[in-house]
Amino acid sequence: MTCIVSEKMTKAEFKRLVHKQPIDTGRYGVRITDPSIVAPYTGAVERHPDLLRDGGSITITNHPRRSWFASVTRRGTVLMVA
């Protein structure tokens, strides 16, 4: 399921806030919503259930335009954005 960024931002802004930042600092300040019927989630990007394990990943987009997409993957204690 594709998650949605709660704030209006560009992919460059999202990447600047999240890419290579340590997970344990809690400084991202980026809220997302996962509209999944099975496991919905609303909260901080670093606390998404799929990112709790190393190698976990999610897809992010902006809403309602869906003009950009980003893949977020956990690598050890940091999140990588592509």
Image (cartoon, rainbow, N blue to C red):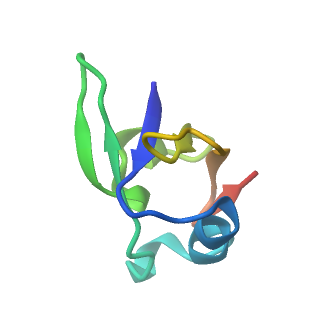
Residue 21 location (% of width, % of height): 60, 76
Count up the numbered dots. 0
Residue at 53% x, 65% y is: 9
Q: Nearer the viewer, residue 66 or 24?
A: 66
Residue 45 location (% of width, % of height): 41, 57
Residue 40 location (% of width, % of height): 23, 31
Q: Nearer the viewer, residue 36 or 77?
A: 36
Residue at 52% x, 41% y is: 65
Left or right of residue 20, residue 52 in this image: left
Quarter location, residue 34: top left
Quadrant for the N terminus in the image = top left
Q: Is residue 4 above or below residue 23?
A: above
Quarter location, residue 50: top left
Q: Is residue 46 above or below residue 29?
A: above
Farthest-out residue, front? 65
Farthest-out residue, right? 82
Residue 49 location (% of width, % of height): 35, 41
Left or right of residue 5, residue 78 in this image: right
Residue at 42% x, 82% y is: 27
Quarter location, residue 76: bottom right
Q: Is residue 25 above or below residue 39?
A: below
Residue at 61% x, 63% y is: 10
Q: Nearer the viewer, residue 74 or 69?
A: 69
Q: Nearer the viewer, residue 45 or 65?
A: 65
